[in-house]
Amino acid sequence: MTADRSAIDSAFEALVTVRRGQTGQILDLFAVPDRFERFSCAYGDLLLDFSKTAISQEALKRLLDLAAAAQVETQREAMFAGDHINLTEDRAVLHTALRERSGDPLPVDGIDVQPGIEETLQRLSAFASGVRDGRIAGARGHAFTDVVNIGIGGSDLGPAMVTGALAPYHDGPRCHFVSNVDGAHIADLLKRLDPISTLFIVASKTFTTVETMCNAATARAFIAGALGEEAVGAHFAAVSTARDQVAAFGIAAERTFGFWDWVGGRYSVWSAVGLPVMIAIGPDRFGEFLAGAAAMDAHFRSAPLDQNLPVLFALVGLWHRNVCSYPSRAIIPYDQRLARLPAYLQQLDMESNGKSVTRDGQKTARATGPIVWGEPGTNAQHAFFQLLHQGTDIVPVEFLVAAEGHEPELRNHQDLLVANCLAQSEALMRGRSLEQAAAQLAAKGLAEEEVARLAPHRVFPGDRPSVTIAYAVLDPFTLGRIIALYEHRVFVEAAVWDINAFDQWGVELGKELATQFLPAMTGAPLPAGTSPSTAGLLAHLKGLAQA
Ligand SMILES: O=P(O)(O)OC[C@H]1O[C@H](O)[C@H](O)[C@@H](O)[C@@H]1O
């Protein structure tokens, strides 16, 4: 696929012209009485409100022209059809197939992938059910009370985030996640676990990732040391595309759950990588999670661009990144159980779209993926919202909020949560002028000079954009829809930027150097050409370690 660069450039130029011509503030755009209705889009109960941005009617029209110029629909169909759109790895990109349960054949390179997906799902369901009801037990016959997922990146963040998000649906064993190669991570967990009733799932697409292999070896020693070498098989399962490597580690084929090279790590929670989620909430609920994503896929594929949630969400992102030149976006879920969503989206978004060359290897014409960061509200309000409201950089915020919590007896908490979420987007947009600040202080009876001294500190510039994603309740179906919404948003942005969202060469150099540096930890010289800074740091650390 070759994008029509000049059409894209013209569409961006038109957008920049619109932006330059804007004189008023976001608030002024609400002079159009039905702005909220026109600048929000619903899919069932899931609403995307982008009316609190500076996108005017004219800007929206130009943004939709941009999507057309980038041939987003053609690119979208190429993905769903199984074309090798991951050009640098020569792979199809078909995580959507994992949640497509119609049973229709889906050929990839001439082979229907649906039977394999179905078979794996059946095996996963049988295994998860067996672990949940105790039919699959430890070497000494004890049911598993604790499941530890050992993985990193896409083999950790998806299941960890989803398991946390769906805590109200947990009726299986406790699930834990170990990712960091820092021994503190696994050590702190193992202290709390009884090997006799602990199952480890080693999740690694490649089964070569150093962190995961190191943690898996430590876990293996934990089981073998406590229960004997012969117990290891009963306490381990694996999720990987590399069956040979799994076998070499000593995990039996019937405990190994595969997936395919057309599932990227950060898009893999729908595959066998979701096994801990399935063990926690059960196969039926996991099916609802897949169904939610499938529903968003169907919407993305069929809705016209101007009523298409992922497309509109992406266009808002492009407006902020390329037209307004904002360097980052903050994800603020007013939903404590989505505490790991910002970290999950950091990988999804930044590993996908943190690129500087186009698909044909040319330098990109404009800025690509922004920095993604965030924390749950209301905690974030008491930490960094100061900068969001009064700092010198503008950060578009993405609020997520549910109408209902899972604790009806704590309705007062939910009311406070929702009121705070709405208040923050309103305050960011509305701001407070010097006159308003002064009037407020004067009303408190402060002397004139005190008012003049303090008022500038209480000014909020306002006119700061945000979008809000609102939904009924964070259930498995809705979580599936939300993640798929973000996945397709990343896809559309990449389509416009003409970059490959599905490779991640940027993680390689650091890994290579770590491999080269490792021998120096035990006395070998550092490789020639290592900088004096790194050599000095190593000498300092080794000096301290010996002290
Ligand atoms: O699943 P694995 O093969 O162990 O990979 C784990 C992670 O590490 C890599 O470095 C990539 O950056 C990630 O995209 C991947 O999810």
Image (cartoon, rainbow, N blue to C red):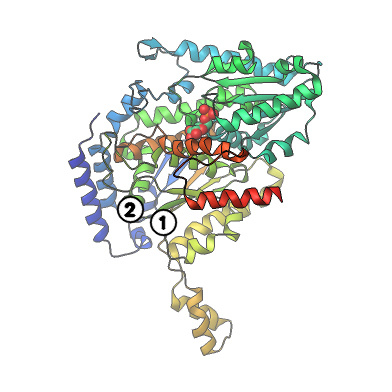
Residue at position x 74%, y 14% in the image: 135
Residue 461 at x, y percent in the picture: 43, 68
Q: Nearer the viewer, residue 160 or 87?
A: 87
Q: Nearer the viewer, residue 436 or 375?
A: 375
Q: Which mark is residue 55?
A: 2
Q: Can residue 144 be seen from the camera position used here?
A: no
Amino acid residing under circle 2: Ile
Residue 248 at x, y percent in the picture: 60, 15
Q: Is residue 427 above or below residue 89?
A: below
Report helix, strand or loop for mark 2: loop
Q: Quadrant location of the N terminus? A: top left
Q: Is residue 218 left or right of residue 271?
A: right
Q: Nearer the viewer, residue 313 or 196?
A: 196
Q: Is residue 312 left or right of residue 263?
A: left
Q: CA distance from mark 2 to mark 1?
A: 10 Å
Q: Using a 10 Å C-alpha cutoff, classify the residue at mark 2 as few (fewer than 14 neighbours), some (14 to 19) or many (20 or more).
A: many
**Which residue is denoted by mark 1 in the rendering?**
465
Q: Is residue 344 above or below residue 291?
A: below
Q: Using a 10 Å C-alpha cutoff, classify the residue at mark 1 as few (fewer than 14 neighbours), some (14 to 19) or many (20 or more).
A: many
Report helix, strand or loop for mark 1: loop
Q: Is residue 464 left or right of residue 272?
A: left
Q: Dividing the picture into quarters, in which one does residue 472 lie?
A: top right
Residue 355 at x, y percent in the picture: 36, 41
Q: Can residue 258 be seen from the camera position used here?
A: yes
Amino acid residing under circle 1: Pro
